[in-house]
Amino acid sequence: MKETPRDARTRVRMMPGAITLNGFIGKDKRSLPEIIAADEVKLQSLNRTATEIAERMKYFVDASFSTFDGKITIEGIYVVETEVTRGYLQCPYSHGGKIRKSTTCLTNTKTGVTVTWTAMNIHLIEDHGFFEGKGSTYRLEPEQLVKALF
Amino acid sequence: MFSVILKDVALLSAIGVTLAVIMVIAGRLLSNYGQCKININGKRDVIVTGGSSLLSSLNDKQIYLPSACGGRGSCGACKCKVDSGGGPLLPTEKPFLSKAELAQGNIRLACQVKVKSDITIDIPASIFNIRRFSATVSEIIDYTYDTKGITFKLAEGEMIDFKAGQYVQLETEPYNKVKQRVARAYSISSSPQINDSLQLIIRYVPEGVCTTWVHQHLKIGDKVFLTGPYGDFFLRDTEADIIYVAGGSGKAPIKSILEDLAVKGTSRKMTYFFGARTLKDLYLTEHMKSFEQVFENFSYVPVLSAAEPTDNWTGKTGFVMPYFKETIRDPKNTEAYLCGSPGMINAVTKALMDNGIPQEKIYYDSFG
Amino acid sequence: MDISSFVLFWAAIFTSNILLTNFLGMCSYLSVSKEIESSFGLGISVIFVLTITTGLNWLVYRYILVPGNIVYLQFIVFIIVIAAFVQLLELIIERYAPALYYTLGIFLPLITVNCAIFGVSLFMVIRNYSFLQSIAFGAGSGIGWLLAILMLAALRRKLKEKLVPVGLQGVGISLIITGIMALAFVGFSGIVQIQ
């Protein structure tokens, strides 16, 4: 699938050192639309949508904000911890708005799967269906994510 | 063909140059007002070459009054107070001034006031104060394994005027994979009485563009740029009791507030809760404890939530919230200042309100 | 053009009012018309600058641009001539007649960018006016502009006490009024036609 000029500009902003230290692409050689399309196929086979996943992630982040510090257990089986640092990041797709700098670590004690995501991940999944490139620091595998969240 | 183009260009240039020469000569002869001094808010003098508008003279000195029309006198955004040296009010300004402003007599449009002599003006402090400062790293202290205190000495003659609790933006220089400058916000941790330098407390964040640079690349003597001050997290001037709550690098603004109060003096009852995980996350404990001798009624309470057995911690443990009750005398007359992550702010705000402290008296500086 | 300068002068004021028929010089027209006093000062300056720059540009056109065969550069040349002249005038008035400066001079920078001034210079070329005709047309256009802004300023003063729908306050209602005034001025067009 070909990249539009807009995708190409976005890709530049996803490179290491532009918005974050290591970028969003990792070692992935595919174009942005290809990465997104591949993950979408994966999601369909798992019977989930990106919006659904993002909503669930937001729910856990908000819930983890009810504790002063450290881990919190939600719905009896999810152990969640969010760490926030000061400041905001911009979305590489360059529409307005600021994205918080936070990392959330969730362990599903029933399935034993642990995933770590950032506020940027949630935004990219919700608005752009983008789970980041293979080899990127915060790449989220839809399969793992679904196993951990639901 | 080529000669035609050349001739046309030459002719056009000739017209342009002739007019330019006339203008330059006229400017020299007619518009020479020498060096003029602009006194701003009674705090700072800037020297400018007279003859141009106040707006553009200030722009040259990196003081940016708002202006939408670019100085043509059609937007009225560049209003400021001119206390002396501005000449009479001009008919170009009148349409933009309200009755109250006309009555006040010294409200002018900066784009219409010409600087022809020394002039005294008043502009909003926020505009006047926010500037880009060039500075040099003069000291780096390791507070903990992941937190450094870095002191920046401002360039010769530069002064920063800020309120304890405000923050500045630090610009990184390009390094390794990072090809462009990025700006990140950090609270000022030094006291506002020191205005030729400032200290920031910066905790290393894995994957952080700026903190990685600060922790791994920044050396004493390096030149950096800072912009600020920003923010509305600062101590309210009342007589109420105070509870401070900080976590992680949230110590910085509280340190600044306490050092400011140490100079000004206060008899307010103050309690400072610092929430950390283990002993190695605690820093500046001696310094904070020393304030208990400085103020009449101050106590510093570090609370560890996950103290290691090897820490031999004898102080308070768990979260800070259960300890509020014993320090609050009169909840309606207590203010709270919080600095930390949204989780901490949420939990602490809830606990404070449960203890009867009104929501409007809880001030916070949230990280996210 | 064999139209007499005298007719041209009156035509420029009424039937071909530069503002109300060509809608040139709108920016300062809308922003300064809040006050009658300021409008008058600005209008007088426009008359003065228009008359002189039209004359100057005619000379530049006739004796430099046409012989030099660079008529196609007239836009640039006219603009720099106007800008330089206005600047010069401002400097002189400011230095030697401070009183005049505070009543008229301060409007001059606003006029440099007034498209009515430039527009008149271009009309003069397109319609092939003689020197005398140009001066008359320039002065007439200036007076016409003064007339228009004074009328608007007077109306806006009345408007201050009237209830205007929120969305139309300020520039909105001024533009509607200008439109109605323009319609009224069309009524004059039977007297004489210049094109």
Image (cartoon, rainbow, N blue to C red):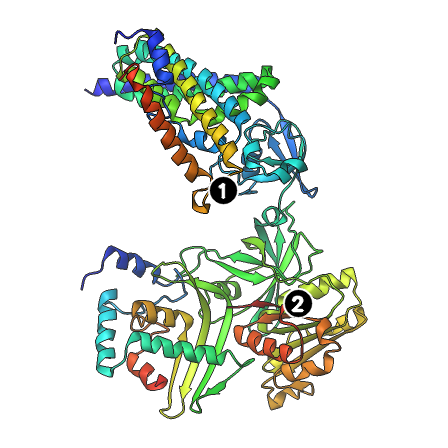
Is B161 drawn above or below residue B11 in the view shown? below
Q: Is residue B76 visible?
A: yes
Horizontal side, residue B70 vs residue C77: left or right: right
Task: Work out whether disc 1 and disc 2 sit on a shared chain.
Answer: no
Horizontal side, residue B294 vs residue A38: left or right: right
Q: Is residue B21 visible?
A: no
CA distance for labels 1 and 2: 52 Å
- The count of marks equals 2
Residue A73 spot, x, y in % from top left: 47, 88
What is the quadrant of residue A16 in the picture?
bottom left
Residue B210 spot, x, y in % from top left: 49, 63
Dot 1, how many residues are within 10 Å of its Cα: few (below 14), some (14-19), or many (20+)? few
Residue B334 spot, x, y in % from top left: 71, 72
The residue indicated by pointer 1 is C163
Image point 32% across, 9% down: which residue?
C63
What is the quadrant of residue A5 in the picture?
bottom left
Image point 69% across, 44% down: which residue?
B43
Residue C120 spot, x, y in % from top left: 35, 19
Q: Is residue B15 or residue B267 the one in the foreground?
A: B267
Secondary element under disc 2, as helix, strand or loop, is helix
The residue indicated by pointer 2 is B254
Q: What's the amino acid at mark 2?
A: Ile
* Position of the N terminus of chain B by quadrant: top left
Horizontal side, residue A118 vs residue A69: left or right: left
Q: Is residue B316 or residue C184 the one in the foreground?
A: C184
User: Which mark's residue is nearer the viewer, 1 or 2?
Assistant: 1
Label 1 resides on the chain identified as C
Horizontal side, residue C136 vs residue B279: left or right: left
Q: Which mark is residue B247?
A: none
Q: Is residue C180 or residue B227 the one in the foreground?
A: C180
Q: What's the amino acid at mark 1?
A: Leu
